[in-house]
Image (cartoon, rainbow, N blue to C red):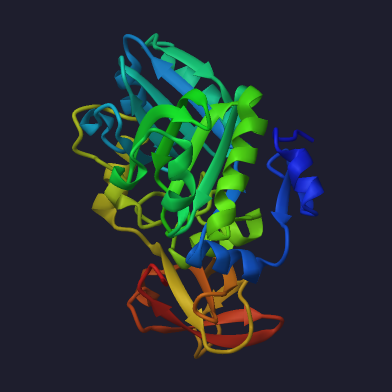
Amino acid sequence: MNTTPFIQYHQTLGAKIVPFAGYQMPISYTSINDEHLCVRQKAGIFDVSHMGEFIVRGAGALDLIQRVTSNDASKLSPGKVQYSCMPNAQGGIIDDLLVYCLPDNSYMLVVNAANIEKDFAHISEQNQSIGAELLDISARTALLAIQGPLATQALQTLTDLPLADMTYYTCAKGTFAGVPNVLVSETGYTGAGGFEVYFYNEHADTIWQAIMEAGKAVGLQPIGLAARDTLRLEKGFCLYGNDIDDTTSPFEAGLGWITRLNKNADFVGKNALIAQKAAGIGRKLVGFVIEDKAIARHGYDLTNPDDQSVIGQVTSGTFSPSLQQSIGMGYVATAYTTEGTIIGVQIRQRNIKAKVVKLPFL
């Protein structure tokens, strides 16, 4: 198993370490509830160095990104970030990703850890006729996410970047904890505000220790992947491999807003998605709440509560620490997608009632 540059800190802090996407990663340090509420109320630090980073630059860089992603990257200018997805020829989702627009006609793509090899192979294949410079810098890049309402207060003493002036989905390079050319962005996967800090592995100790020391004043805690999952689910953010994959389309997943069929560039899967939009979708990803104490889990059947016929499947489910209620997402037939519709969740041979709600939950 691979490890991130911070494994010794996770072990010293007593984290529960589990295999995740080929890495040994901290799932929790104290409890999911405690870590979740710390991020919602104060600030938390996540080691997400397992994520993948690709640099695309030079002649053809924008053409390549336009070819492999569904959103319109031509709208980006240096310092802007865009959420997008990479469709396959059938209109399914190879991966969802972030596109960072950097100076000098260069871009950084941030992809999911489990998909690094698959994504790089796909982009490389599409690049054969374009010839942009494409680099995989994942193995030498560390990434920390500092999330929560007090993240700015915790980090500002460490950098010359005006963090309070940064807006959602922007990025900038500056000195951070004495390290030059650190990339800081504000995208977030928790809905609690905060920043992502990208740097090379050799600076890992310096930056981790600086953040942990500066964060003491605001009660910053290290946070594991379990709380990251409950935090993102409260905001209705999709998790690749659960809520989206190669068989789901952006329209089914509620990601039509990142699928620019009218952009001035052809992209992989465009024709399939045009046809799907014209024909209409037969299922859709919805959010639901359960009044009972039961918790829906990935793969559970969703049913018609009257005759218990299967109408879809749960993709994500948890007990929300913020709402003190069981919540979930899943694909259901379009007839059951209206807000307020009562559906069933098949849990341990019981058909538990749930209600379709508008996302996000929080």
Query: Residue 299's spot in the image, x, y percent?
Result: 63, 65
Q: Is residue 166 left or right of residue 228?
A: left
Number of numbered labels in the structure image? 0
For the point 49% across and 67% down, the residue is 41
Q: Is residue 31 left or right of residue 16?
A: left
Query: Residue 301's spot in the image, x, y percent?
Result: 59, 73
Q: Residue 249, can we see it?
A: yes
| 354 or 184: nearer the viewer | 184
Vertical order, 288 against 128 (above or below):
below
In which quadrant will I find the N terminus?
top right
In which quadrant will I find the C terminus?
bottom left
Q: Is residue 231 left or right of residue 126?
A: right
Vertical order, 183 against 229 (above or below):
above
Query: Residue 167's spot in the image, x, y percent?
Result: 29, 45
Q: Residue 310, can we see it?
A: no
For the point 66% across and 66% down, the residue is 32
Query: Residue 302's spot in the image, x, y percent?
Result: 54, 75
For the point 39% across and 27% down, the residue is 173
Vertical order, 14 against 345 (above or below):
above
| 141 or 87: nearer the viewer | 141
- Image quadrant where residue 144 sits: top right
Q: Is residue 263 left or right of residue 325?
A: left
| 161 or 262: nearer the viewer | 161
- Image quadrant where residue 235 sits: bottom left
